[in-house]
Image (cartoon, rainbow, N blue to C red):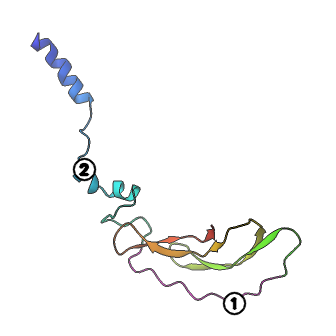
Amino acid sequence: MITRALPLLLCLAACAGPPPLTLEQQLNDNAFNRAFGLPTETPSPGAWKHPPPVPPDQIEVIPRRPRGALMWQPSSWEWTGRDYVWVKGTYVPKVPDISFVRGHWEPDTAPEYFVWTRGGWQ
């Protein structure tokens, strides 16, 4: 009887897949850490250890507001992955109780690295 059950047990063991990761293995897994915002040793794609400083803002004259419920979206610098580009301001549909946050560098999950966060309304 044991000899008949042995092939079935071997098949079940082979089909079960790898054993689940231990907590220590999970904490050493960079993808796991990045998914949960934990520190990693490997920086995120596009992260910079010493990002170039954002250039000073350019002087811009805000044009007269056209008719309608519009608000001014300010000009700002945006990071392309290689350099900064100046994005001109424009009028956009008015939304109450939000403000424009310029693009900026934020700490990455890897220590001493930074990732670019695009500007937008919050």
Q: Nearer the viewer, residue 81 or 119?
A: 119
Please state the extent of the stretch shown in magenta in the rendering: 48-63
> Could you say which disc has been placed on residue 44 in the image?
none
Q: Nearer the viewer, residue 109 or 43?
A: 109
Q: Residue at x 33, y 72 (%)?
A: 111
Q: Where's residue 74, x and y in %?
A: 69, 78
Q: Where's residue 110, x and y in %?
A: 35, 68
Is residue 55 toward the left or the right of residue 12 in the image? right
Is residue 3 toward the left or the right of residue 24 in the image? left
Disc 1 marks which amino acid? Ile
Q: Nearer the viewer, residue 17 or 66?
A: 66
Secondary structure beneath disc 2? helix
In magenta stretch: residue 107: no
What residue would you read off at disc 1? 59
Q: Residue at x 81, y 70 (%)?
A: 70
Count residues near mark 1 (Cα–Cα under 10 Å), then give few for <14, some for 14-19, many for 20+: few
Q: Where's residue 68, x and y in %?
A: 87, 68
Sequence-wise, the earlier of marks 1 and 2 is 2
Is residue 64 toward the left or the right of residue 113 in the image? right
What residue would you read off at disc 2? 23
In magenta stretch: residue 53: yes
Q: Residue at x 42, y 65 (%)?
A: 45
The image quarter containing residue 38 is: bottom left
Q: Nearer the viewer, residue 97 or 90?
A: 97
The quadrant of the image that shows the N terminus is top left
Is residue 67 toward the left or the right of residue 109 in the image? right
Outermost residue toward the top in this view? 1
